[in-house]
Image: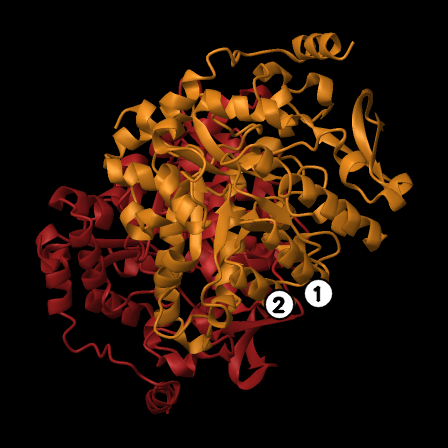
Chain colours: A orange, B red
Amino acid sequence: MNIDDMVMVSIDDHVVEPADLFEKHFPKSLMDQAPKLTANPRNPEVQAWQFQGTVVGSSGLNAVVSWPKEEWGMDPTGYAEMRPGVYDMNQRVRDMDANGTLAATLFATFPGFAGTHLATLPDKKLSLAALKAFNDWVVGEVPGTHPGRFIPLGIIPFYDADESVKEIHRLAAMGCRSISIPETPYGVGDGYPDFKSGHWDPIFKACVEHNIVVSLHIGGGMGLVKRPEAFNLDDMLVLTPLISTIAATDMMLSGAFQKFPDLKVAMSEGGVGWVAPWLDRLERHIVNQSWTGASFLPKGMSPTDVWKKNFLACYITEPSGLNNRERLGIDTIAWECDYPHSDSTWPRSPEVLMEEFVAAELTDEEIDKVTFENAARFFGWDPFEHTPREQATVGALRARAKDVDVSETSKEEYRRRYELAHS
Amino acid sequence: MNIDDMVMVSIDDHVVEPADLFEKHFPKSLMDQAPKLTANPRNPEVQAWQFQGTVVGSSGLNAVVSWPKEEWGMDPTGYAEMRPGVYDMNQRVRDMDANGTLAATLFATFPGFAGTHLATLPDKKLSLAALKAFNDWVVGEVPGTHPGRFIPLGIIPFYDADESVKEIHRLAAMGCRSISIPETPYGVGDGYPDFKSGHWDPIFKACVEHNIVVSLHIGGGMGLVKRPEAFNLDDMLVLTPLISTIAATDMMLSGAFQKFPDLKVAMSEGGVGWVAPWLDRLERHIVNQSWTGASFLPKGMSPTDVWKKNFLACYITEPSGLNNRERLGIDTIAWECDYPHSDSTWPRSPEVLMEEFVAAELTDEEIDKVTFENAARFFGWDPFEHTPREQATVGALRARAKDVDVSETSKEEYRRRYELAHS
């Protein structure tokens, strides 16, 4: 297969909420209490969201795309410095074209990847209004404005099972294909119920009813692994994939798949390399440690069976990740772009992927599975409903994005362009 | 290769200290303050070590070998119930014969795998005396009594760098090939200095001077990963390999290999599957996240170079673990038996290994590397010094152990035999 013939669907990208999101989508009657942009106390030159007495801005690492590496970091950042595709979905689609990305899911920033920031605020009525405003935009508006370019993914008020179920029904009616929930809820804030607690059962039930995928993105679990004081961000960045192993273990051992045999779980941003040794360990565990009497598997199924039926892993770049594809099943591996975060391979994702496909000797059939078929099947989403395959390829998408500047661009230059455009 | 022709050296087995260890090896002048066996407060029928006002016994999972699975568990256990090979080194060698194991390392139980229990006790003079008594037995006595059957591995008073260096010199003079230190010292007790702190530098220096391997066995780090209350032992057993990833990351990023380019680190009980994705992540990290300015690699070396030169991984059984052997390097993979713990494959280790070798299509040369050559080279230990190769094979060792009963045997039956033998 040529790079130009690949079809690429990412199940993990991110969006910084546009400045007018809440003006447009927050209930009119509560507008004076809506999230509002204010000066970031850590750097008054950039914005932050003020809501319910808290102020939360974007961190540089949440929006590094196309900045020179010297400018990467944890400093707060604002719209003027960001590549417009980070928050402007017209520009985003053009950036996707430039990378040959047919479609993507969008995880929230200000609300938290899984709505965790909103969950920790005191006024749950206002938090719910903000959550619905975000969903109305990200699920109700964006995918329809750009047909065939986004797999709709929403968030729920996960701390309240009844409200969550209502929101899942509402999201499903809007065509939503996935919800993002905290991968390790007991690690969020003061601790929310874990997957074994029963709290999540009505939520999982509603997801199964609508064939909605539960996406577990690394985020809230980062604090679960105690680090020594002297170690720093490098240490944490290297260890992030561990959180997927922890979250998948929690989910597998919770018994959720006994109760909901059709529950689908996508592991976001953990890579794929951890899956084979984890399955080896689980398979041995249920035989060798049978004395514990653990019961978490649906009747007649092994951990590997459950993995193959109920899980989807994804990776950004991982040269050795495909070597064990027979062990975990090629049908359980998908690609993610992670635009605009620091791990992303944008705008060279097709080249990075193909180099790894060639090294691992994937067949054309396997390549199609990894780049789009598995994601489409698992999320119940037809990639060619709005875009015929010949117009959905890397080659076709890039052909119409020749004018998109993908070169390294400094914050200062983005600021200059932003001021020009807004003056 | 036939199973009978394999040579097997384990770099991770365990010993429960014999009842007379401290009588024989504790300083006479302090004998009234030596560790003494007493009734275990959790079960007065079994023993526990009383020392410095604390009472610590063995947990069932530390000695399950040949018990029926129904009898496995965390309950306290004592000598009468255990398979004698757990604590009696004459019987141990016969059990090793029955499994075709030529040689093994012995990790401590009462002192802690890495001396961590002794470290947390108040009287450091007494703790040091107990530690030296253990070393005098496990390094000074056992390997000499059974030539060629044990790779000598000791413990150090790691909380005191000066005393540790002295003990390393003393151990080296006794022929010691490895020391066991806490894999995540900041997770032990109230927290000891991490590998970056400088505390360990004189210790690492002394190890390099004597070509002594630093063994990092999973244990103290288990508490680093916060678990939800409702999850149980299964959850923790499945997740244990994560601790090796954490410990190896701490060691790699500490800069220890810049300071001590010849430092050797053996990762005990973490398996091998985690290594390939971890190396992929590290390789990408140093390029993609170069903005952090992290400096931890020796000049001109990549993380993979450091892994191949300075690390050794080992596994018990892991069917997919060998598929990525080209990525991490076949020379970095060793076998461990884990006798008498619950993960052990004893007495069928050769059969379990061979099945996995065949599935992964290992050559005879690769099999030799995994089963003994890598361990022997890394630990600087000649497997055939005391045993010619033709007498060191699985077939030869098993031939002389035909009378060893390896069948499942209940605690009650062991107790009956013990009482017979001691009446």
Instruction: Name the image quarter holding residue A20.
Output: top right
Local packing at callout 1 (Cα closer than 10 Å; few below 14, some 14-19, many 20+) is some
Q: Identify the image quadrant of the N terminus of chain A.
A: top left
Residue occupying image coordinates x 87% and y 40%: A31
Q: Along the line of sight, which residue is nearer the eye, A145 or B144?
A: A145
Number of marks in picture: 2
- Which secondary structure lies at badge 2? helix
What kind of residue is marked 1? Asp
The mark nearer the N terminus, 2 or 1, is 1
Residue A13, numbered label = none
Q: Are marks 2 and 1 in contact (CB under 8 Å)?
A: yes
- Asked whether the viewer can see residue B181, the reply is no
Instruction: Name the image quarter holding residue A360.
Output: top left
Q: Name the residue under label 2.
A: A202
Give the image location of residue A75, x and y in percent. 72, 24
Q: Mark 1 points at which residue?
A: A162
- Which secondary structure lies at badge 1? helix
Q: In this view, does A67 lie to the left or right of B15?
A: right
Q: Along the line of sight, which residue is nearer the eye, A73 or A95?
A: A95
Local packing at callout 2 (Cα closer than 10 Å; few below 14, some 14-19, many 20+) is some
Instruction: Name the image quarter holding residue B411.
Output: bottom left
- Measured along the vertical axis of the image, is residue A299 above or below residue A49? below
Q: Which chain carries label 1?
A: A
- Measured along the vertical axis of the image, is residue A392 above or below residue A195? above
Give the image location of residue B175, x and y in percent. 35, 46
Residue occupying image coordinates x 59% and y 11%: A409
- Measured along the vertical axis of the image, is residue B2 above or below residue A131? below
What kind of residue is marked 2? Pro
